[in-house]
Amino acid sequence: MNANIRLPVIPEYITVHLGPPSSSAQNVTIPFADYIKNVASSEIYPTWPENAIRANILAQISFALNRVYTEYYRSRGYDFDITNSTAYDQSFVNERDIFENISRIVDELFNDYIVRQGAVEPLFAAYCDGDRVSCDGLSQWGSVTLANRGLSPFSILTNYYGNDIGIVEDAPVSGNTESYPGRVLRFGSAGNDVRTIQVRLNRIGRNFPSIPRIPRADGIFGSETEAAVRAFQRAFSLTEDGLVGRATWYSIARTYNAVKRVSDLTSEGIPVSDVTDIFDSSLSLGDTGIEVRELQYFLAIISAFNNFVPPVDIDGIFGVNTANAVRAFEKAYGIAETGEVTPALWDKLYSVYLGIISALDETELPENIVLYPGAPLRIGSEGNDVRTLQEYLNLISETYTEIPKLTVDGVFGSATENAVKVYQRLYNIPQSGVVGSVTWNSILDTYITLI
């Protein structure tokens, strides 16, 4: 599993609303560089010193990217990225002429932006003319004075935004994509989008204590995550169903940005840890590791009860047999046959698996054997599944004495977590202390060999 950081990208296009946000004005969609050229030609003079022009353009780029990255307007249900109302955003005059020197400088700078050190989001680089209007950000006319004194563009920017800023250069350009994953996240879902929700809800919970903390932002949508989602929905007058659809996703995003003041010069900042992916975006032929073993576990169970999926070995190697099983599953459920496992396919696998175990009669299973319950067990979990886990570990501990004996009380406390970690160390499983399908399946296999 490789960790990747989801950093801001430069949009190919930006949609501008030609009026205040709630007005019925026209929207125009233009290339991002052309938008910045228009703003710069509308906001500043081409006769200014070049260092002042460059500093102002970097502020304008950063301001616009902050709106795009935080989905400031789209998270509020609007169909545009920014307005041309100077009461809210930057001046933009549709179809205006562009100054030649400004066009040249923007072509050099359009994929550079300002950040606060330790944060990933483009700085909300507020500014004003500094003559008729004063503000806490950059003074446009003041930047001219500083440029005439010989200050560089970066020195001008640090004069207004502080010494803890940096410039991201040559950021990648990508097509505009909304952050909403396009599928409803629910109990049993897994992946980076689930982790995003967990991280955001935990931060929101610091301001809204009625939202319970999710113990681990591990990308697995379990009962703790569902409880936090329901509490958020209740607090913000959304349908309390525990599902993260579009409305809940963007309400969480909007609230997270608000409590962190992301669209403010005094932003708390979004740290790298908040946007670090912990799951590969997909699994395919040749991949190895614990995620492949988890995939194979679900396929093996589905195969045992549905003959349309061929059996697979749980060996952590995504080989031809695993790819064929994935394709068979895709075909059975009307999904394009790629043989690759995307987040959407993960959700379908979880859904089918949960459907199987919920429909099973206990008499259909070998005596004393319980299938993985479908959601991870961890600190705070309670119930019969925890009790079963404790019983399995106690029997295993009679052979592997490194594993401490547990009180079988159905409560997943620190003692149970420690026993799980010891087991995981013995069996070369990442020592998370959380019992997901891979750990559960390994414990179950060991238990079967010992009974």
Image (cartoon, rainbow, N blue to C red):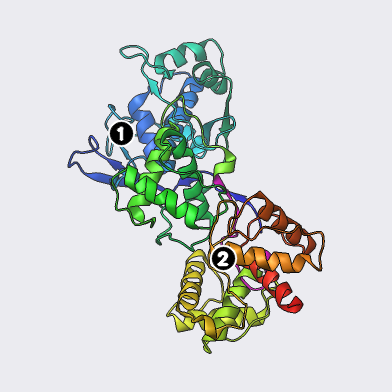
| Image position of 349 (left or right of 128) | right
Q: Which residue is mark 2?
A: 385
| Image position of 425 (left or right of 299) | right
- The residue segment tinted magenta is 275-292
Placement of the C terminus among the 4 image quadrants: bottom right
Classed neighbour count for the residue bearing mark 2: other residues with Cα under 10 Å, few (<14), some (14–19), many (≥20): some
Placement of the N terminus among the 4 image quadrants: bottom right
In this view, the residue in front, 227 or 342, is 227
Residue name at image x 68 percent, y 80 percent = 313
Q: Position of residue 51 (x, y in %)?
A: 51, 21
Circle 2: element type: helix
In this view, the residue in front, 396 or 236, is 396
| Image position of 266 (left or right of 232) | right
Kindly identify the amino acid type of the residue bearing the numbered disc 1: Phe
Number of the label disc, if any, that sits on residue 153: none
Classed neighbour count for the residue bearing mark 1: other residues with Cα under 10 Å, few (<14), some (14–19), many (≥20): many
Q: Does residue 267 lie above or below 184 as drawn?
A: above
Circle 1: element type: loop
Q: Does residue 147 lie above or below 241 as drawn?
A: above
Q: Which residue is mark 1?
A: 92
Predominant SS of the magenta segment: loop
Q: Position of residue 410 (x, y in %)?
A: 58, 59
Q: Is 167 contained in the magenta span?
A: no
Q: Does residue 103 lie above or below 279 as drawn?
A: above
Image quadrant where residue 261 sits = top left
In this view, the residue in front, 374 or 56, is 374
Q: Position of residue 233 (x, y in %)?
A: 34, 48
Image quadrant where residue 263 sits = top left
Residue name at image x 51 percent, y 64 percent = 343
